[in-house]
Amino acid sequence: MKNFMKTNIITHNLISFSGFKALLLFSFILDNPKSYADIQEFFINHEYLHEELSTDTIRIYLNSLREIGCKINIERKNRIAYYYISSHPFELEIDDKQTKNIIRIFKAISQSIDFDDFMILKKFFEKFSVYITNDRLKEQLINISPLSNISINLLESLKKYTQSKTELKIYYNSENSGKKYIDILAEKLQIINGKLYLYGYNSEHKNYSSFLVSKIIEIASVNLKKTEMEIPEITVRYEYYKKDNISFKPLKNEKIIEQDKNRILVDISSKDKFSITQRILSLTNKCKVISPENYKDEILSCLKQMKEGYFGEK
């Protein structure tokens, strides 16, 4: 320790090798039953230790784990004993109230989040779930995930192709027009309102579009030839009227131009016109589109169609 205080360098002299080996044994027999021979082979092949342990030494480590509260069970097959940890003091006991709070937090975070950030969150909960004894919480965390019904292979492929901006032909199950092939220059994956979308340039409609990943049946083909395409960004200006003392929270792609006590003038920019329309409609009668003129016509047409859907043509 004196040497560490002088040099601030950690050496093997500062490590309790007995404690380190006990932790290694803990993790090794936590997954599934292991025999003395399995344990000895594990320590011999360990990248740092390369140490041959006697059966007496292994027994000492097993008893040390028992002393700190680990329950070690024994299975016997063909007269060979296999050891495993069935419970330990590091498990998290989470009651129903805590379960509801964790689920609520998970839902709130995963409603609108970058795909890469969500994957980090997902990996955290996977590690976290190892220590959870509440099986109902484990099941709920899996079922509320935006990725719960999506193939891992499809996810990995889409992530790779969005990173390289690759042109794909996807086989898509559209709610409006049924199953069909769609060409798309894949740009990004994003979770919106708890659902995962693939964003990119749709060559069929000549616009930037989004598609529910859960509706993608398969990637039919990949254009390995690099497609160079500049997707233009759209900027829409709207007025937001302050009502009912509800505070206005701009999105990442929104910029407040000016404001007074009654209204806020906002610019929203995106390559995806559909996401802009979703935002405008979500603000209901507290919002009015100012420009551009062609988009004003589109939003008015959309509102008219919605009205006709409820009340019929008049």
Image (tube, grey):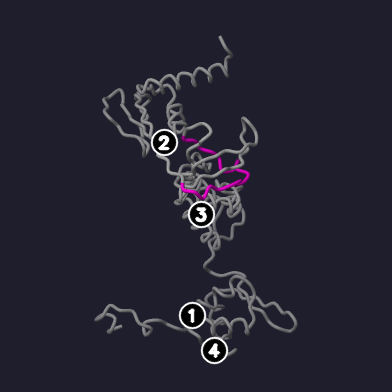
Farthest-out residue, top: 314
Quick check: is 26 in the magenta stretch? Answer: no
Q: Tell me which amino acid carries mark 4.
A: Glu
Disc ID at residue 52? 4
Q: Quadrant of the C terminus?
A: top right
Q: Earlier in the sequence, mark 2 or mark 1?
A: 1
Q: Tell me which amino acid carries mark 2.
A: Lys
Farthest-out residue, left: 6
Quick check: is 213 in the magenta stretch? Answer: yes
Q: Quick check: can you spot residue 102? A: no
Q: Which residue bears the numbered disc 1? A: 47
Circle 1 packing at 10 Å, graded few (<14), some (14-19), many (20+), is: few
Marks 3 and 1 sit apart, C-alpha to C-alpha, by 29 Å
Please tell me which residue is depicted at 44% across the width and 24% down the height of the picture: 284
Q: Is residue 40 above or below residue 32?
A: below
Q: Quick check: can you spot residue 142? A: yes
Kindly report which numbered mark, 1 or 4, lies closer to the viewer in this rendering.
Answer: 1
Marks 3 and 2 sit apart, C-alpha to C-alpha, by 28 Å
Kindly report which numbered mark, 4 or 2, lies closer to the viewer in this rendering.
Answer: 2
Q: Which residue bears the numbered disc 3? A: 122
